[in-house]
Image (cartoon, rainbow, N blue to C red):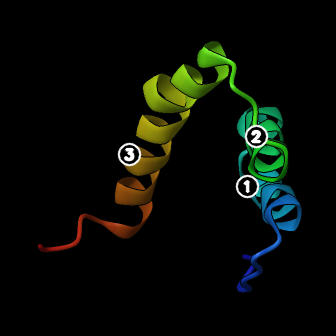
Amino acid sequence: MWDGWTSDLREMAEAFAGYYPERAGQLRRAAESGYEPVGDRAVLWSYVDDLGPWLAAEYARVHGVKAP
């Protein structure tokens, strides 16, 4: 288990890729977009419709749902 933290999006995407290789490409592209934003609606909607909900569900599965 990687027990670190970095604000470097590329480094974080690589750490993530070790745990979720099936989502690695998507996270790498998201990290790059953090440094070089794109205005492509399809890319942005993929984060809203797919990546974001998946990340939230995976966080809840691994860490549980926090009380408000």
Q: CA distance from mark 2 to mark 1?
A: 25 Å
Q: Nearer the viewer, mark 2 or mark 1?
A: 2
Q: What type is the residue that disc 2 sits on?
A: Pro
Reading the image, the residue beneath label 1 is: 19
* SS at circle 2: loop
> Farthest left residue?
68
- Residue in view at x 78 percent, y 50 percent: 31
Lateral position of residue 42 relative to residue 27, left or right: left
* SS at circle 1: helix
**Image disc number at residue 57:** 3
Give the x, y percent position of residue 60. 34, 57
Give the x, y percent position of residue 49. 45, 23
Q: What type is the residue that disc 1 sits on?
A: Tyr
Image quadrant for the C terminus?
bottom left
Say whether disc 3 or disc 1 marks the residue closer to the N-terminus: 1
* SS at circle 3: helix
Q: Nearer the viewer, mark 3 or mark 2?
A: 2
Q: Is 64 drawn above or below residue 33 in the view shown?
A: below
Reading the image, the residue beneath label 2 is: 37
Q: CA distance from mark 3 to mark 1?
A: 15 Å
> Farthest front residue?
39
**Image disc number at residue 54:** none
Q: Nearer the viewer, residue 10 or 36?
A: 36
Lateral position of residue 51 relative to residue 15, left or right: left
Q: What type is the residue that disc 3 sits on?
A: Ala
- Residue in view at x 81 percent, y 64 percent: 15
Give the x, y percent position of residue 34. 75, 51
Q: Nearer the viewer, residue 41 or 31?
A: 41
> Farthest top residue?
42
